[in-house]
Image (cartoon, rainbow, N blue to C red):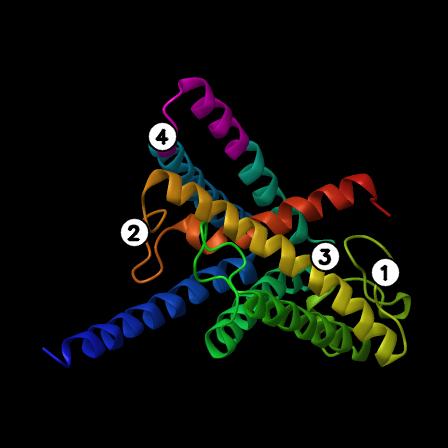
């Protein structure tokens, strides 16, 4: 009986690892192929997230009017996020922008997870998400900053030019703007720019995570679904990314150039 809990944790870690590898393989293949394959993949994930959103709303709210409003909000919110993923992978941008956005959000998750577990400390909102700490948020900011800085340096050096279409002499494009607006020649100002953007991305991603945690607590469930072994549901994996994509869409809409 003493070894039962460690064995269970080890087994769960194995399931999570296998699931993560499968998810990355499927998503990476769809992203690389692009076109109709990427569109179908994004639409399938969006429908999965929306289905879980509707289930959570039904369990969390008794008033039909509130449920309807929440479901309409979900359709709009998830639809904008899915549209942004398709927009970022269009032929004019190739893989560069969508990889940068996705990897930056992953950087937030990884940085927050390991920093929070290592340092611990005060909780941000224990009533909503007991595991989220201020140290984890700082780690998430650092993770996002490092990913952005690395991507910016790779773009400057032309090491991922095969992923970005356009004339190299014009500089790397950034969502249709030439040259990319946050790239500078000097490393220190570049890192400062990446730090500011990393701060913004980390706060947005954490806000998306907190929103889903709030909704799950109202619904009385631990995970949004059980489709992904060891990881929960689609919404559990996409909550932070959705928030970042939604606000990025607003930024592009309000300031397209």
Q: Is 66 within the magenta?
A: yes
Q: Which residues are magenta?
A: 60-75
Mark 4 / mark 3, whichever is N-terminal: 4
Callout 1: few (<14), some (14-19), or many (20+) C-alpha neighbours within 10 Å? Answer: few
* Residue 100 picture quarter: bottom right
- The numbered dot on residue 181 is 1
Q: Position of residue 132 (x, y in %)?
A: 49, 61
Give the residue at x 48% y 60%.
Answer: 27
Mark 4 / mark 2, whichever is N-terminal: 4
Mark 1 / mark 2, whichever is N-terminal: 1
Q: Which residue is the site of mark 4?
A: 58
- The numbered dot on residue 93 is 3
Given residues 193 and 219, the one toward you in this image is 219
Give the residue at x 67% y 52%.
Answer: 88
Q: Which residue is the site of mark 2?
A: 226
Q: Is residue 33 left or right of residue 157?
A: left
Above or below, 2 against 176 in this view is below
Question: In the image, which is nearer the foreground, mark 3 or mark 2?
Answer: 2
Mark 1 / mark 3, whichever is N-terminal: 3
What secondary structure is found at the residue carrying circle 4?
A: helix
Give the residue at x 56% y 72%.
Answer: 111
**Quadrant in which the N terminus appears:** bottom left
User: Alpha carbon of mark 4 to alpha carbon of mark 3: how far?
Assistant: 39 Å
């Amino acid at each position: 009986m003493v070894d039962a809990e460690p064995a269970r944790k080890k087994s769960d870690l194995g399931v999570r690892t296998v699931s993560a590898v499968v998810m990355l393989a499927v998503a990476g293949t769809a992203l690389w192929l692009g076109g109709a394959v990427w569109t179908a993949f994004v639409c399938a994930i969006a429908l999965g997230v929306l289905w879980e959103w509707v289930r959570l709303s039904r369990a969390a709210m008794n008033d039909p009017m509130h449920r309807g409003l929440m479901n309409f909000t979900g359709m709009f919110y998830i639809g904008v996020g899915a549209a942004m993923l398709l927009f970022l992978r269009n032929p004019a941008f190739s893989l560069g922008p969508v990889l940068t956005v996705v990897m930056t959000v992953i950087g937030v998750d990884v940085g927050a997870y390991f920093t929070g577990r290592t340092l611990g400390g005060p909780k941000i909102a224990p009533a909503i998400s007991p595991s989220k700490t201020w140290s984890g948020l700082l780690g998430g900011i650092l993770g996002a900053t490092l990913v952005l800085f690395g991507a910016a340096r790779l773009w400057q050096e032309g090491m991922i030019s095969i992923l970005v279409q356009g004339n190299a002499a014009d500089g790397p494009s950034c969502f249709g703007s030439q040259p990319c607006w946050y790239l500078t020649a000097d490393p220190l100002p570049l890192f400062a720019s990446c730090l500011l953007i990393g701060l913004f991305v980390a706060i947005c991603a954490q806000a998306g995570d907190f929103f889903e945690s709030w909704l799950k607590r109202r619904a009385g469930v631990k995970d949004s679904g059980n489709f992904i072994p060891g990881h929960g549901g689609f919404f559990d994996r996409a909550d932070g990314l959705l928030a970042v994509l939604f606000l990025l869409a607003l930024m592009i809409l309000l300031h397209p150039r």
